[in-house]
Each structure stands twice: as structure tokens, then as C-alpha cells.
Amino acid sequence: MIEQDKIVTFKISSKTFKKLKEISKTSKINVSKLIRVFIENYIKELESGKTLELVETIKIDMKK
């Protein structure tokens, strides 16, 4: 994560991106929304004190 003038850049591994694309195909939710939800969930888990690998944290709340 790189912070530059309130712009935050995340790097998502190709493995994670492929998994999000698979979820997108089966759930009919576009990839950009899934990525946003994924990053929001990732930040929440980091704030709760957990240290995580991006690939292990694909927890998408389909209610959003």
C-alpha cells in the first residue's frame, strides 16, 4: 500500500485477481466492485490487528 496525497494504491496478486474474476462470473457482480469490497474488508481486518496475506483473505460480503 502506497499513500500519496490521499490516493491509496494497492497491489493485488494475479492469483487474487483471477479468483475475484471467477467470483465475478458466478455472482454477476462486476470485478471493480468486488475489488473495492475486497480492499475494504482487507483494511477492516488489518485495523482489527490481524496480519494477512491478500490471497488468503478473499471474504466478499455479497450483501453490499
Image (spheres, rainbow, N blue to C red):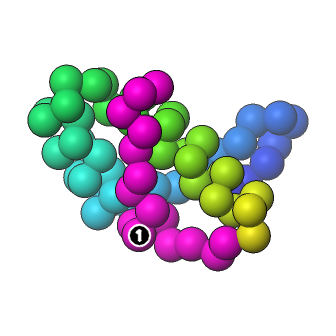
Q: Residue furthest left?
A: 26
Q: Could you say which quadrant of the image residue 22 lies in?
A: top left
- In the image, is residue 37 part of the stretch drawn in magenta? no
Q: Which residue is mark 1?
A: 56
**4 above or below 25?**
below
**20 above or below 36?**
below
Give the position of the N terminus as an image quadrant.
Answer: bottom right
Q: Could you say which quadrant of the image residue 28 lies in?
A: top left
**Could you tell me the amino acid type at mark 1?**
Glu
**21 above or below 46?**
above
Q: x%, y% of residue 14?
A: 32, 59
Give the residue at x 57% y 72%: 52
Q: Secondary structure at mark 1?
A: helix
Front in this rendered view, residue 48 or 14: 48
Give the residue at x 48% y 45%: 38
Q: x%, y% of residue 6?
A: 83, 35
- In the image, is residue 60 part of the stretch drawn in magenta? yes
Describe residue 29's horizontal placement relative to residue 33 as left or right. left
**45 above or below 21?**
below
Q: x%, y% of residue 54?
A: 48, 64
Main SS of the magenta part reads loop
Give the residue at x 39% y 67%: 55
Magenta residues (range): 50-64
